[in-house]
Image (spheres, rainbow, N blue to C red):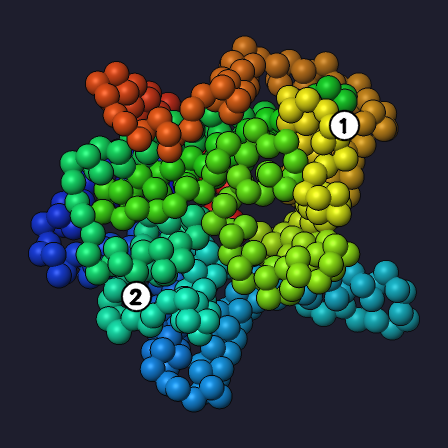
Amino acid sequence: MVFSSHIFLYYFLPLSLLFYFGAPRRAKNLVLTLISYLFYGWSNPLFTLLMFFSTLVDYCCGLVIGTSSVVRVRKTALLVSLASNLGLLGFFKYTGFAMESYNQLFSLLGFEGFQPVEVLHFLLPLGISFYTFQSMSYTIDVYRGQGKSIRNFIDFACFVSMFPQLVAGPIIRFQEVADQLLERQHSLEKFARGVTFFSLGMAKKVLLANSCGKIADLAFGAGALHWLDSWFGIAAYSFQIYFDFSGYSDMAIGLGLMFGFVFAKNFDSPYHSASITEFWRRWHISLFTCLRDYLYIPLGGNRKGGNRTAINLAIVMLLGGLWHGASWNFVVWGGLHGSLLGFERVFGKRPLYHGLPRPIRVLLTYILVLIAWVFFRAETFNGALLYLGSMFGVGPVPTGSLLLDGLLYTPYHLLAMMLAAVVVWAAPQTWDWSRKLSTVKAIVTVGLFLLSAAVLSMQSYNPFIYFNF
């Protein structure tokens, strides 16, 4: 089930709110947990068993870590938590990738008599990368003394399964909502802001992300392209993934507010960045914060000199790329960003073009981000190289490029791209715009929601991009 669907908008959400606000205060977390399990198991009820297993293991491990004074016992509990979560993630997400990589490696080396192993593929449970990371972070924080273990299993299950951010984030750490699980305020003002967040996020998804996604699909499905068409296509994808994911985050934050929870900001106008370092302070903030706290700092962070800092950043971003998907394309995407981050760190967190005016630096940073997005979007590594070649005029221009132009540069597509660019670089952020509501803003919010709902009724199924991760 996705937020931008009729069954969610007109049935699931209204009934969820009805049951939640109709429950007594002490039962609200239980009701929200049951609602969340229904939401998660809608497409495949078996997925709920995996989430329950991860929840139960980490709840028990957290109790042991929080109550035991024996170092060996606490370490063992932490290892059990890490092994179970990483084991689930590795089995379902990376088994097939590992087998394919094994076959490709030995075929490339040309060993005689090599028999490739049969590649096994498993149905990837929705959001497994998010909830295992989130649940595992709880035991790590308790082990580090950065949070207290929780004794109420229902409260912990509510934290792990909370449906607003369950499938695609933002990644919520336990210490951020621990107090809210015990006591939170419900007010008309908070609910109204939640509705505003949700409506604006839905508009981003339905009106902008889906429209730009059609352009990106045409460009990446065309093979070789004219250089202008390829840049137009990757720019469309940059808008698609931004509005798709930030739109989901806005909707998740809005739903959280409706149920009384306050989640942290997950996007901060990332395409305004004047360097890759700044970009990663603004893009998917919850993930980058987790990578910093659970990988970068344990590796040594910036405490062991510039060269080691650059290596640490490269390792973190390589693993961050792999976290996004079981493909060498994601590894290359992470490696590109890691290399750029390391390069900037050597020059004092500044890019090579730091002396230029800020608008030029923003443009150059955006171009670097676009180049990296090619590997994120392309289905194969060779496809990514072919697309990059088209962007820089390498390779023949297909004879049917004029026909493709007729499909790419329609008035509808041009209008969608223009609106997307205006929202990216000129419009206020949802977080700021919704901080103080007014009658005019309420009218705009309702208008965008109705328009999005009307357009949604005419669109084909289009799931959120990050549901795949």
Q: Amino acid at mark 1?
A: Met
Q: Which residue is mark 1?
A: 391
Number of marks drawn = 2
Q: Residue 335's spot in the image, x, y percent? A: 71, 50
Sequence-wise, which precedes: disc 2 or disc 1? 2
Q: Residue 110's spot in the image, x, y percent? A: 90, 65
Label number found at residue 381: none
Q: Tell me where residue 69 sits by quadrant.
A: bottom left
Say which of 16 and 178 sits in front: 178
Q: Are marks 2 and 1 in contact (CB under 8 Å)?
A: no
Name the secondary structure under disc 1. helix
Q: On the picture, is 127 further left or further right than 255?
A: right
Against 37, is 363 above or below?
Answer: above
Q: Tell me where residue 270 sits by quadrant.
A: top right
Name the secondary structure under disc 2. helix
Q: Is residue 135 visible?
A: yes
